[in-house]
Amino acid sequence: MAYENIIAKKKGKVGLITLNRPDALNALNTELNLEMGKALDKFEADDQIGCIVITGSEKAFAAGADVKEMQPKSYMQAYKEDFLHPWERVARCRVPVIAAVSGYALGGGCELAMMCDFIIAADTAVFGQPEINLAILPGAGGTQRLTRLVGKSKAMEMCLTGRFMDAEEAERAGLVSRVVPADTLLDDALKTAEKIASFSRPAVFMVKESVDRAYETTLAEGILFERRLFYSTFAMADQKEGMQAFIDKRSAAFKNE
Ligand code: CAA
């Protein structure tokens, strides 16, 4: 399917989505988010796709929500349209999603990266929630996800002052899982995605669901949820195969069931 604001490709078992509004530093408008939703629907429905990578350009992952689209909106329009709703599709994706971030990830761009399961950053990456400059606040989860990821002090400072964080600080603060040289970013992210996609798809989904649970509930409930999922893997052909392959000292052949 041809898109106008993104490029979506299958690379073996990995779905690659490249944000593609170079003239606007990949500012995220409604069209782009609807297209991304469609691409995610297709990848999720494809049993062969085991991981997704979202990336931008060398200069910008995404410089935020599209200010030119938002500026004239009235409160009633924003409320009735719930125009940020399509953004949440990324956070609801069952297939793991890696954000490969080079350059600016600001405002909604930082929020989109944080909706992904983890972030691999180029050494050129810059993160920030500069909405305060526009007399607004982050609207796609920034105050919530950033605070959970880096703690109250840093999140509060960034949201209140709009200051940017470089890749090194972002790794130190736990916002990104790894920093890599800019020229190997996509290769690194794709290799990581291929590794995830080589495993049993339902087992991968369960890992993702279980880690996500840690953000949603108490420790006791989370441990119980994990234990139930763990036992349920014993009903999977892939669990029998994975363990038998270990015992036989051979590679496992998973069937995603
Ligand atoms: N929305 C719309 N257009 C944007 C944009 C955005 N968020 N960010 C950049 N652009 C456009 C610019 O208007 C410019 O377009 P023109 O060539 O037509 O003038 C083009 O992209 C290039 O941008 P700059 O000339 O500004 O590039 P620069 O290298 O000088 O600066 C930058 C780069 C520091 C990222 C700067 O563009 C910038 O500050 N962008 C806005 C960042 C921002 O405020 N983001 C938060 C948006 S609000 C939000 O995201 C709300 C939410 O939580 C959902």
Image (spheres, grey):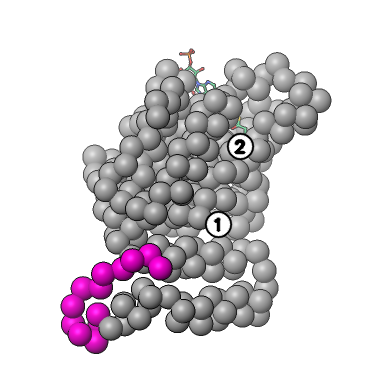
On the image, numbered disc 1 is attached to which residue?
149
Q: In front: 130, or 43?
A: 43
Secondary structure beneath label 2:
helix
Residue depth check, mark 2 versus mark 1: number of the one nearer the observer: 2
Q: In the rendered view, would you say 246 is above or below 147?
A: below
Instruction: Measuring from the top left, give residue 237's x and y in whole percent.
Output: 38, 75
Decide if residue 37 is in sight here: yes
| Location of residue 86 (image quadrant) | top right
Q: What stretch is highlighted in magenta?
A: 245-257
| Location of residue 31 (image quadrant) | top right
Secondary structure beneath label 1:
helix
Q: Check residue 2 in the rendering and tell me which mark sits there, or answer none.
A: none
On the image, numbered disc 2 is attached to which residue?
86
Instruction: Measuring from the top left, give residue 4's x and y in whole percent.
Output: 43, 22
Q: Is the magenta stretch mostly helix, strand or loop?
A: loop
Question: Local crowd at mark 1 within 10 Å, few (<14), some, or many (≥20)?
Answer: some
Q: What residue is rendered at 31% in x and 51% in y?
A: 13
Q: What residue is rendered at 49% in x and 67% in y?
A: 206
**Residue at the bottom extreme of this rendering:** 247
Mark 2 is on which residue type?
Pro
Is residue 254 found inside the magenta-colored segment of the image? yes
Mark 1 is on which residue type?
Leu
Q: Earlier in the sequence, mark 2 or mark 1?
A: 2
